[in-house]
Image (tube, helix red, strand yellow):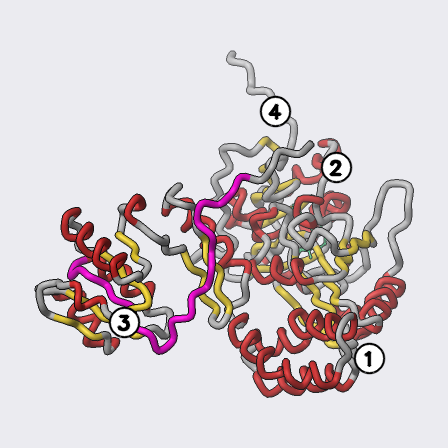
Amino acid sequence: MPAPTPKLNAFPVFMRVTGRVVTIVGGGEEALAKARLLAQSSARLRLVAAAPEPALAAWAAETGAQIVAAPYEAGHLHGSALVFAATGEAAAERRVVDDARALAIPVNAVDRPELCDFYTPALVNRAPVAVAIGTEGAGPVLAQMIRARVDRMLAPSLGSLAALAAQYRPAVERVLPKGLARRRYWKAFFTGETAHALAAGDAPRARRSASALLQAGGRGTGHVALVGAGPGAEDLLTLRAQRLMMEADVIVHDALVPEAVIAMGRRDAERIDVGKRKGRHSTSQQAICDLLVGLARDGRRVVRLKAGDPLVFGRAGEELAALAEAGVSSEVVPGVTAAFAAAADLGLPLTLRGVASTLVFTTGHDLSGAVLPDWARLAVGGATVAVYMGGSVAGSVASRLIEAGLGPDTPVAVVENASLAERRLFAGRLADLPALAGRGLAGPVMTVIGQAVAAAALDRAEPLAEPRLPARAA
Ligand code: SAH
């Protein structure tokens, strides 16, 4: 039998305070902290302090809170919805607590849990939505940690979305039958076009879409977000990427995106792997485009998760064009591209004053033709070159660049599995690059070429070429 869930000793409720008085007794820092917290509500604040400290007085003047500048007496509590004792003196607080209880007003004594009728939570405020976190005195540090995490999960626009929902509620209840249709409406409302328009600050579009959704009987129009997953470390995912993954119905990802990153998404989202795997062909680009369009037409919210940044060697152009042609709404969320992750692992400045002021992202695949591409000239001119999909073409990239006039001694660094714990770093000269083939690299590989590489912190890198034996002393 599962162990019973422990009982809460304090039961959370949301108390209606609008138009009511909340009294805080105390003139110092603790009183000001409580006043600031309470000022997130529309309660009328009454601060009782014979000698308010300047910070409290200034805050009250600024916010219009009432200050009763007189020695505390029980009469000050009359008519209050809540009372806070925040004087910092045990005897004075005890007195406020006794007075409040005699008047049947719930009271909180700051930092004296044994005297409290209620505790104040750590608060995530997206009015009218509030998340209150209580720990029954286990500690404000824990509460603040949880608060920060919840705060990151919730879009700043959540409050205006909830307010808009309240406006639409009567119409929805009139038009849509109770049950499935209404649930479908609200799900599409809170995760779909309406929510996205508000997040983008476009209130008129949000209203249009909420109304259109109502007319369509709650059937949402799907949406596809092309989302950059970053180089592989899950904490290099952007907050926006994670938010969209939490809202997605379906996550369509490539093989390069690690499981740990996909796991940052909604647990019950459907996952579709369209990547290459050993012994199995990857889904063709056309099939992926068709899949995305089909999912969106079913009203699903799709995250198309791509390694790094979706717009860098990610075939995003084809997917965006297919979505636009099918009339499916889409957006792009940038990600940390592999070149940036590799540079960070190496401590390598991609641009360097007086050394490199041009940065080239290339695949090197265009080096096989008879004509050298433009970027080879940029490399000779001193650009830093980041080679994507470099593992297999590194050797030919090196020989063609040397042919084009780049010095064989030009510094080169290579990172396999950038940003991940199992990464490997290599450093050497352009002429050594073909040796990479013999290193048995199985992960994705980023190669960076140029004089700026010499400025990197390469002490942890292995040599690219097998180390030459030192000349024997004569
Ligand atoms: N859109 C991706 C690139 C896709 S192309 C981005 O912006 O990063 C795939 C190539 O990216 C790989 O062959 C490799 O060269 C590079 N790559 C992706 N992740 C990498 C990683 N963690 N470490 C090194 N290279 C990586």
Residue type (three-letter) at the residue carrying disc 4: Arg
Q: What secondary structure is marked by label 3? A: loop
Give above or below for 322 relative to 49: below
Give above or below for 366 relative to 182: above
Q: Which residues are magenta?
A: 6-28
Q: Residues within 10 Å of mark 2 (few under 14, many from 20)?
A: few
Residue type (three-letter) at the residue carrying disc 2: Ala
N-terminal of the two: label 1 or label 2? 1
* Residue shown at the point (79%, 76%) measured from the top left: 219
Q: Residues within 10 Å of mark 4 (few under 14, many from 20)?
A: few
Q: Is residue 368 magenta?
A: no
Give above or below for 351 relative to 416: below
Quadrant of residue 183 in the image? bottom right
Q: Nearer the viewer, mark 3 or mark 2?
A: 3
Measure how far apart labels 3 and 1 are at the Cα level: 64 Å
- Res. 442 mark: 2
Q: What secondary structure is marked by label 4? A: loop
The residue labelled by disc 4 is: 468
Quadrant of residue 250 in the image? bottom right
The residue labelled by disc 3 is: 79
Q: Main secondary structure of the magenta part?
A: loop
N-terminal of the two: label 4 or label 1? 1
Do callouts 3 and 4 mark residues in contact (Cβ within 8 Å)? no
Measure how far apart labels 3 and 2 are at the Cα level: 72 Å
Measure how far apart labels 4 and 1 are at the Cα level: 58 Å
Do callouts 4 and 1 mark residues in contact (Cβ within 8 Å)? no
Q: Nearer the viewer, mark 1 or mark 2?
A: 1
Q: Nearer the viewer, mark 3 or mark 1?
A: 3
